[in-house]
Amino acid sequence: MNAPIIEFKNVKKCFGDTVIFRDFNFKVEENEIVSIIGPSGSGKSTLLRILMTLEGIDGGYINVAGESLWHMPWQGQYVPANSKHLHKMRHHLGMVFQHFNLFPHMTVKRNITEAPMRVKGISREEAEASAEKLLKLVGLSDKANNYPNDLSGGQKQRVGIARALAMKPSILLLDEITSALDPELVDEVLDVIRNLVKEDNFTMLLVTHEMYFAREISDRVCFFDNGAIVEEGPPEMIFTQPKEERTKAFLNAYLGNNS
Amino acid sequence: MNGFQWDWAFTWEVLPMILSAAKVTLLATLLGSIFAIFMGLVFALLRRSNSRVLRTSVYWIVEFIRSTPLLVQIFFLYYVMPEFGISLSPLATGVFALGLHYGAYLSEVFRSGIDGIEKGQWEAARALNLSLIDTYKDIVLPQAIRPMIPATGNYIIAMFKETPQLSAITLLEMLQIAKIIGSENFRYLEPFTLVGILYLVFSVAAAYGIHQVERRFPKEGFSLK
């Protein structure tokens, strides 16, 4: 087996006096789809935000695609990464946000082409051609010239997915991408993800409250509580025969509400 | 002397001279505001720098400029700088002083405008790996400009009304010319009244213009091609 594409080693993370991760270890294999479930405040989103370099760490190491994410080699030892190193590492990663975070002053098309043109130096023609393909993939070809505020929440999030994909990341981070949506708009977004994983290999890490979706799409489900993985395993196991009391209590509360 | 009698003939005679001095006033304001906007942006961005030393020094420079009178700064630039070998014309000195002084005020406006941009926009830019420069140029500033327009406009109008201070370094702007005309003809009523009216007209027109710019400015900001 190859080395894991993501590996957390004894990672420590605090916000002021609040400890999020004390001694956190976690691995994701290449092309693995991992869902992270658990109560809010358990550190699920922080995990993704650390990988996307939106939050630093206070200890430990993280490897992404065989290189240290937050550290770099310098004169024979590992030192905190500089912005150049982080810039390089971010090429592996793409993120879709709970609140979309589209650029409201740019058209849908420009939202998607901005980063490929600016960061990768791709020509406008090429970037727009690839944006059109992505818009087709997310079913929004007719909205290319609209502004985000003309779109529904579900449409905005589909643009968010297309925008992240435009940078061709090998690891896709989905941070509660349907939590800000009205219930009737959730499926159009999840369908995009369903199609995506059908067509292509992706390493995907998703934080979600959609238990049915997590069960359907994941190779592995991790139940998070208090900054630690309480229980993990194939979805069937976690959802039908959870071993830990905390997992049972959480799933009962959740699936009880949803069904 | 019947000082309250308005002399129309004299008014028409001095109006062209005052109007041509108004050009100097407007030029100083225009160049001063361009320089002030530039300096304001530089100060605002430096105050967001990662380096604490830089942030703190810029903070104190801005505080210093804002807390000392404009006239002192004008005198300093005009009379003291030549001792260090930097000698500028009255207009250049005026533009420099106005730009620096109002740049310090504008930096606060720009800073709060930039702070008003949602955290999510910065995070999206970072997740897409945009450089800091592209993030400011394409994402942050285009959205921050609209809320900055009213306060920036007010400062530029305030700057315009402070241009008479430049008469202290012999710049022949409106008020200075009016004073010269007055002393040559022993009539101050008409020239000073004209200057007052011109200030009023320009200020009201500028305020209206700024309001229009703000109204027509796209709510979400704009994007560069």
Image: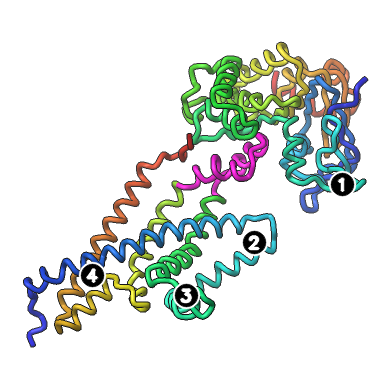
Q: Is label 2 on the same chain as label 3?
A: yes
Relative placement, left or right, of B192 versus B82 is left
From what the image shows, is residue A81 above or below residue A96?
below
Q: Residue furthest front?
A: B85
Image coordinates of residue A169 in percent, x first then y, are 72, 26
What secondary structure is the stretch in magenta mostly built from? Answer: helix
- Alpha carbons under labels 4 and 3: distance apart: 28 Å
Q: Are marks 1 and 3 on the same chain?
A: no
Disc nearest the viewer among 2 and 1: 1
Label 1: state its secondary structure: strand
- Between disc 2 and disc 3, whose residue precedes? 2
User: Which amino acid, by three-letter code, is at mark 2?
Assistant: Arg
Instruction: List x then y, in percent, for residue B84.
Output: 54, 77
**Residues at marks 2 and 3 touching, judged by CB atoms closer than 8 Å:** no
Spatial separation of the CA atoms under disc 4 and disc 2: 41 Å
Which circle marks residue B218 in the picture?
none
Q: CA distance from mark 1 to mark 4?
A: 67 Å
Residue B196 got which mark? Answer: 4
Residue type at the position of mark 1: Trp
**What label does residue A74 carry, if any?**
1
Q: Quadrant of residue B93?
A: bottom left
